Image (cartoon, grey):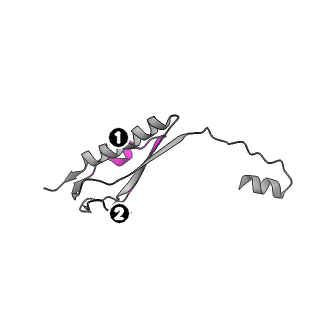
Amino acid sequence: IGNIVRASVGDEVSFEPKTDKKCVATRLLALTPGKIKALPDMASYINENTFIEHHLEVGNTINEYHTNLDGCGYVVCTADDMTVASECAEKLKNKIDSEIVREN
């Protein structure tokens, strides 16, 4: 949008990226089924390289994953290397899954 405004008023436009290139990996939160008794502190997992979007709440039931409707959100990790980003996303998804307390 910035270039559109600059071009409309006759200013010089720039097509150079303003940020460094990063690799991005995501994982769908397709979690172990069960009724949620307690959730981990998701905010503690978020930093400049990780992001979590979820709709989990205590009392919700996690269904077995069959379609995207069964997903509980997703995690996003960034890194300079694709393997690092991918491993980060997978580990974070697994950590969230293992730390959710479910009713027996």
- Left or right: where 28 falls relative to 82: left
Q: Give percent across and percent down for residue 18.
A: 67, 42
Inter-mark Cα distance, 2 to 1: 22 Å
**Disc 2 marks which residue?**
67
* Numbered disc 1: secondary structure: helix
Quarter of image, res 10:
bottom right
* Numbered disc 2: secondary structure: loop
- Residue name at image x 84 percent, y 56 percent: 9
Disc 2: CA contacts within 10 A as few (<14), some (14-19) or many (>=20):
few
Q: Give percent across and percent down for residue 54.
A: 38, 56
Q: Give percent across and percent down for residue 15.
A: 74, 45
Disc 1: CA contacts within 10 A as few (<14), some (14-19) or many (>=20):
few
**Disc 1 marks which residue?**
91
Residue at far front of view: 66
Q: Which residues are magenta?
A: 39-55
Q: Amino acid at mark 1?
A: Lys
Q: Is residue 52 magenta?
A: yes
- Between 95 and 82, the one nearer to me in the picture: 82
